[in-house]
Amino acid sequence: MKAIESIFGLKVRDSYTIRPLVEEDMTQMHRTFGESFSDYAIPYNLTLDEFTMKMKHKVHISFRHSYGAFSNQKLIAFVFHAVNRYENLLMAYNGGTGVLPGHQGNHLTASLYAEILPELSSDGIERCVLEVLETNERAIHVYEHIGFRRTKRFTCFQLKDPEKLRSASYKVVSVPDANLDRYCDLGKCGTSFGDTNDQLRHNIQFETTLEVRINEELAGYLIFQPSLGRITQFCVSENFRRSGIGRTLFTKAKSLSKRTLTVININREYMEVIAFLKSVGFVNTLDQFEMQLAVG
């Protein structure tokens, strides 16, 4: 662990202790995360158990590569990282960055990255990747100062008009063993880091997989988290598009979900997917930049 007073030539007003996070910090991580995002555009409402589940499985946090800044043993700021392959490179994905109100403006995010980057480099990690709201100009400025550059634009959706989800008469089956590699054969699997197959394998036991088959041929699938309403992946085979299969899958997901359905991080270039989501009652609620930083 290391106490710092300045970093990257920027003066830090108070002295903080920076160290890697450990699993025993989870309760503090949950509390600090909630306080940091209390006024965020995306409502934060995860219980400690839900947060722990998300960190361990959905994000699949790498504690070795996740750091916190502490003041009097209280977690003040954090960067959570997962490590996996993305775009054929080994990357560290920022699954959350936050600084408590009252400590913002002290360059703590830059300080954390100054400690993290040498560790990433020594472990052969080639890039860092993150997502940030396009409206969050302050965070974008901080990340660009560290060296991140914008690489993609993502759009996010929430189901607002469920009346448009009128399904066709296809049989939807919930399958216990998702064939993730086979699903990618249906079409582009151009997901963001968090929904890639390699990352999804860590959480697949907590997700529900729906399939539609026609004459034993896989026509479409959808993977989602019923407890959160969060759709992770979906695709309809080119041979069966515009026949109601997508609507059928989304209708079934809605009936099983405990919360409003959401779809995040659709690449803005995927106009056909965006048009489909709008046609079945989804509304664009947020837009994000993907940003990447070369390590080393």
Image (spheres, rainbow, N blue to C red):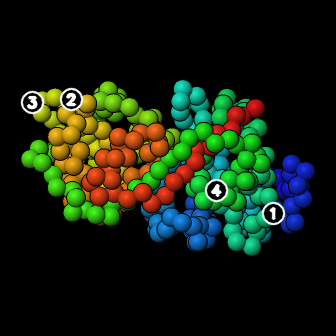
Going 58% across and 48% down the picture, which residue do you hit? 289
How many marks can you see?
4
Q: Is residue 85 above or below residue 159?
A: above
Q: Judging from the image, what secondary structure is the residue with disc 3 in?
A: loop
Q: In this rendering, would 207 be left or right of 98?
A: left
Say which quarter of the image contains residue 138. bottom right
Label 2, label 1: how many angstroms apart (C-alpha)? Answer: 55 Å
The amino acid pointed to by label 3 is Asn
Label 1, label 3: how many angstroms apart (C-alpha)? Answer: 61 Å
Q: Earlier in the sequence, mark 4 or mark 3?
A: 4
Q: Earlier in the sequence, mark 2 or mark 4?
A: 4
Going 28% across and 44% down the picture, which residue do you hit? 222
Label 3, label 2: how many angstroms apart (C-alpha)? Answer: 13 Å
Going 80% across and 58% down the picture, which residue do you hit? 107
Q: In this rendering, would 146 be left or right of 286?
A: right
Label 2, label 4: how many angstroms apart (C-alpha)? Answer: 42 Å
Q: In this rendering, would 82 be left or right of 238?
A: right
Q: Judging from the image, what secondary structure is the residue with disc 4 in?
A: strand
Q: Earlier in the sequence, mark 4 or mark 1?
A: 4
Q: Earlier in the sequence, mark 3 or mark 2?
A: 3
Towards the viewer: 147 or 276: 276
- The residue indicated by pointer 3 is 215
Q: Is label 2 or label 4 in front?
A: 2
Residue 270, percent across and down? 41, 39
What is the crowding at mark 3: few (fewer than 14 residues within 10 Å), some, or many (at least 20)?
few
Q: Which mark is residue 106?
A: 1
Say which quarter of the image contains residue 292. top right
Q: Earlier in the sequence, mark 1 or mark 3?
A: 1
Q: In this rendering, would 196 be left or right of 79?
A: left
- The residue indicated by pointer 4 is 97
